[in-house]
Image (cartoon, grey):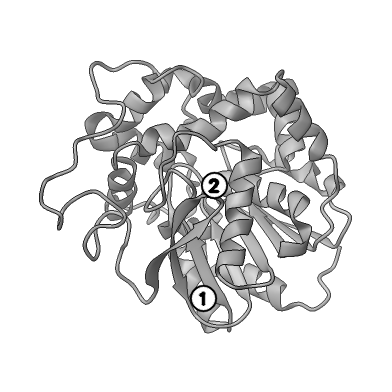
């Protein structure tokens, strides 16, 4: 297994940083709001709609009835990454809602607003727009970073917190700056700091790098993930105009703000402890976020905290081991007194 370094995001020749032009036929237009199916509104037992929150419009897929479980995807994916958990949660008596983050999938691509505080307000705003008093937040990768943030900023709206493949923001920051092994594993984040070149690399050759990243970050335990059909879905979603740029902007903020007042203020703000029950899940062979980087996140939780490691699994435990992940998630959500 290889870990892509920042050189993977170097220039590869002319490419439109905004992606290919949209076809004139609306039935094949690469837009989350196009005809049924398409690259974002994929068919399934769920329903699709848009909700307004925090000054933008967000695409959601929802399934089931019961307590709300809001699912937040990571990079380089979109809501569809939670397809297995949505059906499992609905069968278990939950209202499963997977949203596309700002700038991704079928959600609005705004010119600004990609700092974690604002993105977390997108998440809590969607909870309110769905008419729910609170939600169990489940976040993977960047979605996990935002779930940590939302639990600190709006604790009354977060009933429970589940984070996969992402340490607490303060732990992530310290690991990237002081742990050489984690800094190397996360070198793609450093590579994202170049202007426009990462977007061009992501979109080159029909977004081939998206497939390469997912393959490189997945563990060897489940050779059936990812298959070519799955990779094609993620490549087509990334090829929607402006998606590559918007997907990278949160990572640019994380690095470029470290010495700025807004970044320092955010880091101080995240000193506030998480006071909701927290389930932290991680793949033992995750090459993008090292296990030791995530394992220290419990120090920021002043509530029942449970850590679970998936043996032989990489960066995508919810897709590499969907049954095991869903079972762990649902059992914990139904546990009235989760252990510390």
Q: Residue furthest front?
A: 55
Above or below, comparing residue 306 to residue 141 in the picture: below
According to the picture, the residue beneath numbered tag 1 turns out to be 88
Sooner in the amino-acid sequence: mark 1 or mark 2: 1
> Which quarter of the figure is the C terminus placed in?
bottom right
Q: In this view, does 289 lie to the left or right of 83?
A: right
CA–CA distance in space, label 1 to label 2: 21 Å
Give coordinates of residue 221: x percent, y percent.
49, 53
- Looking at the image, which is closer to me, 333 or 53? 53
- Looking at the image, which is closer to me, 2 or 244? 244
Give coordinates of residue 333: x percent, y percent.
69, 73
According to the picture, the residue beneath numbered tag 2 turns out to be 314
Can residue 179 be seen here? no
In the picture, residue 309 is in which quadrant?
bottom right
Above or below, comparing residue 281 to residue 328 in the picture: above
Callout 1: SS: helix
């Amino acid at each position: 297994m290889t870990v892509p370094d920042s050189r993977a995001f170097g220039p590869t020749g002319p490419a439109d940083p905004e992606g290919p032009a949209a076809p004139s036929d609306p039935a094949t237009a690469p837009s989350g709001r196009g005809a049924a199916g398409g690259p974002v509104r994929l068919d399934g037992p769920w329903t699709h709609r848009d909700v307004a929150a925090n000054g933008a419009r967000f695409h959601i897929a929802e399934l089931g009835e019961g307590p709300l479980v809001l699912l937040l995807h990571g990079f380089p994916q979109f809501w569809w990454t939670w397809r297995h958990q949505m059906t499992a949660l609905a069968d278990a008596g939950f209202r499963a809602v997977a949203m596309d983050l700002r700038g991704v999938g079928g959600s609005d691509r705004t010119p600004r607003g990609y700092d974690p505080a604002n993105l977390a307000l997108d998440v809590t705003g969607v909870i309110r727009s769905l008419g729910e008093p609170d939600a169990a937040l489940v976040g993977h990768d960047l979605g996990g970073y935002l779930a940590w943030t939302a639990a600190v900023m709006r604790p009354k709206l977060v009933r429970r917190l589940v984070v996969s493949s992402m340490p607490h923001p303060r732990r992530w920051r310290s690991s990237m700056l002081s742990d050489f092994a984690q800094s190397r594993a996360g070198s793609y984040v450093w590579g994202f700091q170049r202007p426009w070149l990462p977007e061009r690399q992501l979109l080159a050759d029909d977004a081939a790098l998206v497939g390469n990243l997912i393959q490189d970050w997945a563990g060897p335990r489940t050779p059936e993930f990812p298959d070519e059909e799955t990779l094609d879905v993620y490549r087509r979603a990334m090829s929607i105009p402006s998606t590559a740029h918007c997907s990278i902007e949160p990572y640019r903020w994380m690095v470029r703000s470290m010495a700025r007042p807004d970044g320092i203020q955010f880091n101080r703000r995240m000193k506030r402890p998480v006071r909701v029950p927290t389930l932290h899940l991680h793949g033992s062979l995750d090459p993008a976020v090292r296990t030791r980087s995530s394992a220290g996140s419990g120090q920021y939780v002043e509530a029942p905290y449970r850590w679970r490691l998936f043996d032989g699994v990489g960066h995508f435990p919810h897709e590499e081991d969907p049954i095991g992940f869903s079972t762990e998630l649902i059992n914990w959500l139904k546990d009235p007194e989760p252990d510390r």
